[in-house]
Amino acid sequence: EIVDTIAALRSRVATRRSAGPLGLVPTMGALHEGHASLIRQARAECSTVVLSIFLNPIQYDRPEDLERYPRSLDVDVALCASLGVDFVFAPSVAEMYPVPLECRVEVGRLADHLCGKFRPGHFSGVATVVLKLFEIVQQDRAYFGEKDAQQLAVIRRLVSDVNIPTTIIGVPTVREPDGLALSSRNQRLDSRERQLALALVR
Ligand code: PAF
């Protein structure tokens, strides 16, 4: 079932809580085999699986990056159905941010290097939306790809620093045959950039 409001998601999930562990797979859509592996693990370990699709504007420091992010809701929902996701939570920006935020999660040292050094405010935006999703769904287990290693470290630390009662599961990276990690953004690489990206694996 596709649910697009916080109130509806909360009421659906409430009816399933007693059935056993609730799993959340947070995504921004444009799902690929890497996401499928998160879903399969959640499906194997949880009675109810919620997958969120929300292209979170506050984690983008460059508007063109947000505009160019691939969008494919119908295909995403079909994949979720085929893998047994119970609820796809796909809220609008207005639903998640009805008014501009006054309070955000501040991420310290963990965000000042690697990817964070080049994307000011990115991990604060990620931590803020993840905290919101965790408060909305109140899952037992949440699944994230190890590919986004810095993001995973930030989220683990968020959960420990503010005492969120959830288990964070890091799921191994899924790769192309030549070693490139699957990523929605790979669609934006031309053939030269696709070759250059293999430097990351090496
Ligand atoms: O990794 C992502 O897809 C996003 O950063 C996340 C965790 C869903 C937060 O918007």
Image: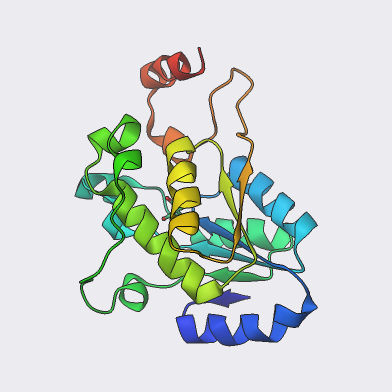
Task: Give the percent coordinates (x, y) of residue 85.
Answer: 68, 64
Left or right, residue 48 beside residue 144: right
Does the rendering let one see residue 28? no
For the point 37% across and 25% down, the residue is 190
Left or right, residue 9 beside residue 43: left
- Assign the N terminus to one quadrant of the image: bottom right
Does the rendering let one see residue 92? yes
- Does residue 103 sit above or below 36 in this rendering? below
For the point 55% across and 73% down, the residue is 137
Q: How many marks?
A: 0
Left or right, residue 201 beside residue 95: right
For the point 37% across and 20% down, the residue is 193
Task: Give the percent coordinates (x, y) of residue 182.
Answer: 54, 34
Task: Give the percent coordinates (x, y) of residue 105.
Answer: 31, 60
Task: Give the percent coordinates (x, y) of residue 183.
Answer: 49, 37
For the point 38% across and 62% down, the residue is 129
The colour scheme is rainbow
